[in-house]
Image (tube, rainbow, N blue to C red):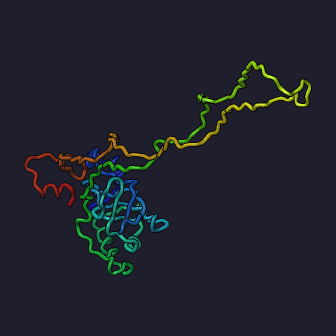
């Protein structure tokens, strides 16, 4: 009967089984059916002899106040730092036994418990499912992510134009031709007799002549000399934006090493599939 141990324990005792480039989901966010947040991954259970991940330890704090359960690793879909259990429902988790940290789990025993919980009476008929053997394999679908630039345009105020007016005062000279009358006195010598006597009443009579002159009278009239219309035009230019993006590339371990129960490396040219299964206690 293959024993299951916590991944963090095998990291210290059987490091040669998993190497340095192993998958550790601890701390990742877990989601259930319809991408409903379940909680987070608290760790994993692996086979003691092979180091293969068989179960993920899921803290279902998003659905229940305090409950950790074991979910077959093959039901998981890994996307970046998130783990999606696309078929896992609240009723299924409720039917699962609480994970006991000090209990010594075995693969075959837990295998039977899974099948009992998946078809429990508390699970609605439409949510019951038969768990296949592939559900116990480590997640085989690994989605590689990359960042892509999405450029949107915002309208901003790039400038403000104000058009107003002010009064300018200046002196303007205008030449005006004016007429002015002046007195023109002509005296003519006369030698003729008259009946008038010096000292008569009209002897002191005076003659008045009005002299007229033109005077400039200046008035001001207002004229429109210019019209100013303020509009705007659109100009286009190309701006180069530099941004750093990331993508994930696949790392493949091609060693394919075979170890026995004690973690010793088996390196023979004539090794067979039965030898491998026997070495791994299968």
Q: Residue furthest left?
A: 270
Q: 226 or 60: which is nearer to us?
A: 226
State left or right for residue 163 relative to residue 198: left
Relative height, residue 119 to residue 28 (above, below): below
Residue 273: x and y in percent read 12, 57
Residue 107: x and y in percent read 29, 64
Relative height, residue 263 to residue 281 (above, below): above
Asked which quadrant contains residue 39, the reply is bottom left
Q: 210 or 146: which is nearer to us?
A: 210
State left or right for residue 109 relative to residue 216: left
Asked which quadrant contains residue 238, the reply is top left
State left or right for residue 221 relative to residue 62: right
Residue that appears at 38% across and 46% down? 234
State left or right for residue 225 relative to residue 111: right
Residue 47: x and y in percent read 28, 57
Relative height, residue 196 to residue 1 (above, below): above
Residue that appears at 31% across and 64% down? 72
* Quarter that holds the C terminus: bottom left
Residue that appears at 73% across and 22% down? 185
Residue 189: x and y in percent read 75, 18
Q: 251 or 145: which is nearer to us?
A: 145
Q: 146 or 171: which is nearer to us?
A: 171
Asked which quadrant contains residue 76, the reply is bottom left
Residue that appears at 39% across and 45% down? 233
* Quarter that holds the N terminus: bottom left
């Amino acid at each position: 009967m293959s024993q299951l141990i916590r991944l963090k324990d095998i990291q210290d005792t059987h490091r040669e089984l998993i190497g340095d480039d192993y998958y550790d989901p601890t701390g990742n966010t877990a989601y259930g059916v319809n991408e409903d947040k379940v909680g987070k991954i608290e760790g994993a259970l692996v086979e003691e002899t092979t180091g293969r991940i068989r179960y993920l330890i899921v803290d279902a704090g998003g659905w229940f106040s305090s409950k950790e359960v074991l979910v077959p690793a093959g039901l998981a879909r890994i996307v970046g730092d998130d783990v999606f259990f696309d078929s896992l429902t609240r009723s299924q988790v409720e039917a699962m036994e609480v994970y006991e940290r000090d209990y010594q789990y075995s693969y075959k025993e837990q295998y039977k418990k899974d099948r009992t919980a998946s078809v429990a009476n508390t699970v609605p008929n439409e949510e019951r499912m038969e768990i296949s053997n592939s559900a116990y394999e480590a997640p085989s679908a690994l989605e590689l992510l990359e960042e892509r630039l999405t450029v949107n345009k915002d309208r901003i105020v790039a400038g403000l134009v104000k058009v107003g007016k002010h009064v300018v005062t200046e002196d303007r000279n205008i030449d005006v031709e004016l007429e002015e009358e002046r007195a023109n006195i002509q005296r003519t010598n006369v030698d003729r007799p008259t009946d008038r006597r010096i000292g008569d009443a009209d002897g002191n009579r005076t003659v008045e002549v009005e002299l007229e002159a033109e005077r400039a009278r200046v008035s001001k009239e207002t004229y429109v000399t210019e019209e100013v219309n303020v509009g705007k035009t659109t100009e286009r230019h190309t701006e180069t934006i530099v941004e750093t993006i990331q993508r994930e590339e696949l790392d493949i371990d091609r060693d394919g090493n075979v170890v026995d129960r004690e973690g010793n490396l088996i390196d023979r040219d004539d090794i067979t599939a039965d030898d491998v299964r026997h070495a791994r206690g299968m």
